[in-house]
Image: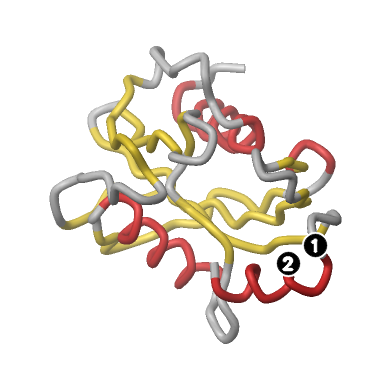
């Protein structure tokens, strides 16, 4: 998080608006999630944009960094923002996320955790999502499941 780290040096832990992208990578009615190293919760692979990067480029880069997988084709699901995407990190940093969420079914590689940001990478059946999901990812996953299963 180069850009965000630089911003944090200036503003400390105060709330900031953080733009980024994530990938809802799925196959055979299973969704890929990563167990975050910072809070131990399951989350979507994704993260913040770096300077000069597009939202899609950020999503693809973060997917690769966190899982070892390369997205071959992305489709925009939705852009999420607002109070439901507020998050306070374990270190006290506060953010209001603006997230471009992309769906992906066409990818290359073998899923592996990076050992730094992610402790585990795993596919979950659409009807067996873990209960310990990272709060800002819940609206994204719910929208995805509504679209792909009709679940509300």
In this rendering, position of residue 93 left or right of residue 42: right
Residue 105: numbered disc = none
- The image shows residue 12, relative to residue 102, as above or below, that is below
Q: x, y (%) of residue 7?
A: 73, 73
Residue 105 x, y percent position in the rendering: 29, 47
Residue at 65% x, 68% y: name it. 4
Q: CA distance from mark 2 to mark 1?
A: 5 Å
Q: Residue at x 44, y 17 (%)?
A: 130
How many residues crowd around disc 2 within 10 Å: few (fewer than 14), some, or many (20 or more)?
A: some
Q: Nearer the viewer, residue 149 or 61?
A: 61
State which quarter of the image contains the N terminus. Answer: bottom right
* Rendering quarter of residue 17: bottom right
Q: 144 left or right of 118?
A: right
Residue designated by label 2: 8
Q: Position of residue 74 (x, y in %)?
A: 39, 59
Tell me what residue is drawn at x 63 percent, y 54 percent: 99
Q: Quadrant of the C terminus?
A: top right
Identify residue for label 1: 12
Residue at the limit of the structure toward the bottom, as seen here: 52
């Amino acid at each position: 998080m180069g850009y965000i780290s630089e911003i944090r040096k200036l503003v400390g832990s105060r709330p900031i608006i953080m733009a980024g992208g994530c990938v809802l990578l799925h196959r055979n009615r299973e969704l890929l999630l990563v167990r975050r190293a910072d809070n131990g919760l399951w989350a979507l692979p994704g993260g913040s944009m770096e300077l000069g990067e597009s939202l899609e480029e950020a999503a693809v880069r973060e997917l690769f960094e966190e899982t070892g997988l390369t997205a071959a084709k992305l489709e925009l699901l939705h852009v999420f923002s607002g109070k439901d995407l507020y998050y306070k990190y374990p270190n006290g940093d506060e953010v209001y996320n603006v997230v471009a969420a992309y769906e992906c079914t066409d990818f290359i590689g073998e899923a592996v955790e990076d050992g730094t940001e992610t402790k585990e990478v795993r596919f979950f059946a659409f009807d067996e999502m873990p209960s310990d999901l990272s709060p800002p990812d819940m609206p994204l996953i719910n929208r995805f499941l509504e679209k792909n299963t009709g679940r509300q």
